[in-house]
C-alpha cells in the first residue's frame, strides 16, 4: 500500500484507470437497467413498483459501504499516517451522503404505494436517517475547521465514532420488528429472491460500486490538486 | 486519583457557582413543560401519552444545551493545557470532566424530570422506571456530550455542530429509554439492562475519543 502513498504516483494511476472504470460503469448500468426495467418480471404482489428496488437497494448498500470506506480510511490515517487516507475519507463523504439520500428518497417513493405512507419511523428507516445525519456532521466538520491538519484529526474521530451506526442499520430489521422487509440477499442460507430479479439487482449493485469508484477517484484527484494549489499559493505569498 | 478528585470538585463547584448549570437547565425544562400543553392543548389523556417521550427529549436537549461548557471555558483560559500536562492521562481528565457534568447537570435533571412529569399527568406507576432509566441513561448522555464538546472545542458555531454530531449517538438511548417507560412491565428490566450496557460502553470509549479530539486542539 505504501507505493500508493505518493500522490503523484496515485494521480498518474488514477488518470490511467479512470477511462476504463467509466466504460465499465456505463456497460454495467446498461445491462443492469435492461435487466431491471425490461427482463425482470413484475412482482406477483407488488406489480411494477418492484422495479424501484433496483435503484433503491444498491443505493442503500452503497451508503453503508461508503461510510465503511470512510471509517476504514480514517483508521488507516490514524494508524499508518497514510497521506492519502484523509483525502479518501473526506472525498467519500459527499458521495456517500448522496447515495444515502437516494436510498431514503426512493424508499419513500416505494413506501407510499406499498405501505400507504411516505415515511414510517421504524428501526431501518430511522437508522438510515441517522446515517444521513452522520454524513452531514462529518462534512460539516471539514467545513467548520479552517486548519486542514486539525480538521483531518477531528474528522477521523467523527468517522470512527459514527461507524457504530453501520451494524445497527444492517441488523435493524432482525433486531426489531420492522415494516421494512428483512434481508433477502446477504443472509445465512443464501438469497431468498428469484434469480430473474437477483441478477439485475447484483449487476446494479456492481454498477453503483463502479460509479462510486469513478466518482471517488475523480473527487480525490481534484482534492489533491486543490491542496497542491493551496500550498503553491502559500509558498508564493511567502516569497513576496 | 487525588488529582482527579480535586478536578471533579472544582468542576462541580464552578458549575454550581456560575449559576449557568443546573439552574438554566431546569429553567429550560420548565419552559418546555409549560409550552407543551399550550401548544398541543390541555387534554389530559394526550398529555399522559406524550409525557415520557417529552421528558426524554427535553432531557436530551438540556444536556446538549449545556454540553459546550464541559471543556470550552477551560480551553479558553488555558487551564485545559495545564490539565493536559498533569501527571494524569488526558483520557482520565476527559472522563472526570464528563462525570462532573453528569453530577452537576444531567443527574439532578434526570431525578427531577419524572416528578416534573406529574405536571403532564404522567402515570404514577412509571415514575420509578422512568427515574431509573434516566439516571442510567443520563450518564451516557454526559459522556457522549463530552465527545461532542471536545470535537467542537474551538469552533464559533460549535453549539449547532455538537447537536449534529451527538444526536445520532443519543438515538439508541432514547429508544431504550422509551421502551423502559412505554408501560409494558415485561420490557422494563431488559431495557434498563441495555441502557446500562450502553452507559458502560460509552464509559470506556467516550473518554478515548474525547481525549483524542482534545489533543488535536491542544497541539
Image: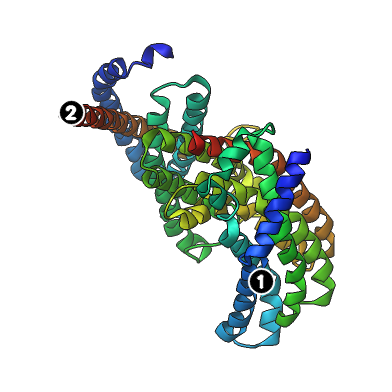
* Spatial separation of the CA atoms under disc 1 and disc 2: 55 Å
- Relative to residue A196, is residue B175 drawn left or right? right
Mark 1 vs mark 2, foreground winner is: 2
| Residue lying farthest to the top in this orientation | A3
Q: Is residue B54 above or below residue A144?
A: below
Q: Secondary structure at mark 1?
A: helix
Where is residue A130 drawn, in percent x and y?
53, 51
Where is residue B78 drawn, in percent x and y?
53, 44
Per the image, the residue denoted by label 1 is B26
Q: Give residue B111's quadrant in the image.
A: bottom right
Quadrant containing the N terminus of chain B in the rendered view:
top right
- Relative to residue A24, is residue A163 drawn left or right? right
Per the image, the residue denoted by label 2 is A236
User: Which chain hosts label 1?
Assistant: B
Where is residue A55 drawn, in percent x and y?
40, 45
What residue is shown at x 66% (from left), y 87% (from top)? Answer: B43
Q: Is residue B3 above or below residue A107?
A: above
What residue is shown at x 65% (from left), y 34% (from top)? Answer: B86
Q: Residues within 10 Å of mark 1 (few under 14, many from 20)?
A: many
Amino acid at each position: 500500500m505504501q507505493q500508493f502513498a505518493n500522490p503523484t504516483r496515485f494521480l498518474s494511476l488514477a488518470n490511467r484507470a479512470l477511462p476504463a472504470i467509466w466504460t465499465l460503469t456505463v456497460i454495467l448500468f446498461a445491462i443492469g437497467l435492461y435487466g431491471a426495467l425490461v427482463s425482470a418480471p413484475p412482482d406477483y404482489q407488488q406489480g411494477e413498483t418492484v422495479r424501484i428496488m433496483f435503484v433503491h437497494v444498491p443505493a442503500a448498500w452503497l451508503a453503508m459501504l461508503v461510510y465503511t470506506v470512510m471509517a476504514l480510511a480514517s483508521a488507516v490515517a490514524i494508524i499508518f499516517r497514510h497521506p492519502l487516507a484523509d483525502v479518501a475519507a473526506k472525498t467519500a463523504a459527499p458521495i456517500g451522503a448522496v447515495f444515502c439520500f437516494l436510498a431514503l428518497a426512493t424508499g419513500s417513493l416505494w413506501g407510499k404505494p406499498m405501505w400507504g405512507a411516505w415515511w414510517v419511523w421504524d428501526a431501518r428507516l430511522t437508522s438510515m436517517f441517522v446515517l444521513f445525519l452522520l454524513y452531514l456532521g462529518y462534512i460539516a466538520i471539514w467545513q467548520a475547521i479552517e486548519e486542514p491538519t486539525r480538521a483531518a484529526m477531528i474528522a477521523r474521530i467523527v468517522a470512527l465514532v459514527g461507524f457504530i451506526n453501520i451494524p445497527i442499520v444492517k441488523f435493524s430489521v432482525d433486531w426489531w420488528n420492522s415494516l421494512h422487509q428483512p434481508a433477502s440477499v446477504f443472509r445465512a442460507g443464501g438469497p431468498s429472491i428469484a434469480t430473474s430479479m437477483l441478477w439485475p439487482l447484483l449487476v446494479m449493485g456492481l454498477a453503483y460500486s463502479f460509479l462510486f469508484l469513478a466518482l471517488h477517484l475523480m473527487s480525490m484527484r481534484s482534492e489533491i490538486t486543490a491542496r497542491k494549489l493551496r500550498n503553491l499559493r502559500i509558498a508564493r505569498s511567502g516569497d513576496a | 486519583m487525588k488529582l482527579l478528585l480535586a478536578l471533579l470538585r472544582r468542576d462541580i463547584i464552578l458549575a454550581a457557582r456560575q449559576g449557568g448549570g443546573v439552574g438554566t437547565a431546569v429553567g429550560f425544562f420548565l419552559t418546555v413543560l409549560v409550552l407543551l400543553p399550550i401548544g398541543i392543548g390541555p387534554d389530559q389523556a394526550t398529555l399522559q401519552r406524550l409525557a415520557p417521550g417529552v421528558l426524554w427529549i427535553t432531557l436530551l436537549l438540556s444536556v446538549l444545551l449545556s454540553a459546550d461548557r464541559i471543556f470550552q471555558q477551560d480551553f479558553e483560559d488555558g487551564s485545559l493545557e495545564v490539565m493536559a500536562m498533569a501527571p494524569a492521562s488526558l483520557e482520565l481528565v476527559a472522563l472526570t470532566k464528563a462525570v462532573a457534568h453528569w453530577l452537576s447537570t444531567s443527574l439532578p435533571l434526570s431525578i427531577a424530570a419524572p416528578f416534573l412529569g406529574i405536571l403532564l399527568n404522567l402515570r404514577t406507576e412509571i415514575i420509578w422506571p422512568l427515574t431509573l432509566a434516566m439516571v442510567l441513561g443520563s450518564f451516557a448522555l454526559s459522556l457522549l456530550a463530552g465527545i461532542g464538546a471536545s470535537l467542537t472545542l474551538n469552533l464559533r458555531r460549535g453549539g449547532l455542530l455538537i447537536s449534529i454530531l451527538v444526536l445520532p449517538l443519543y438515538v439508541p438511548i432514547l429508544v431504550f429509554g422509551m421502551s423502559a417507560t412505554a408501560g409494558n412491565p415485561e420490557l422494563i428490566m431488559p431495557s434498563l439492562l441495555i441502557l446500562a450496557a450502553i452507559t458502560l460502553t460509552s464509559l470506556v470509549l467516550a473518554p478515548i475519543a474525547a481525549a483524542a479530539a482534545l489533543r488535536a486542539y491542544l497541539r
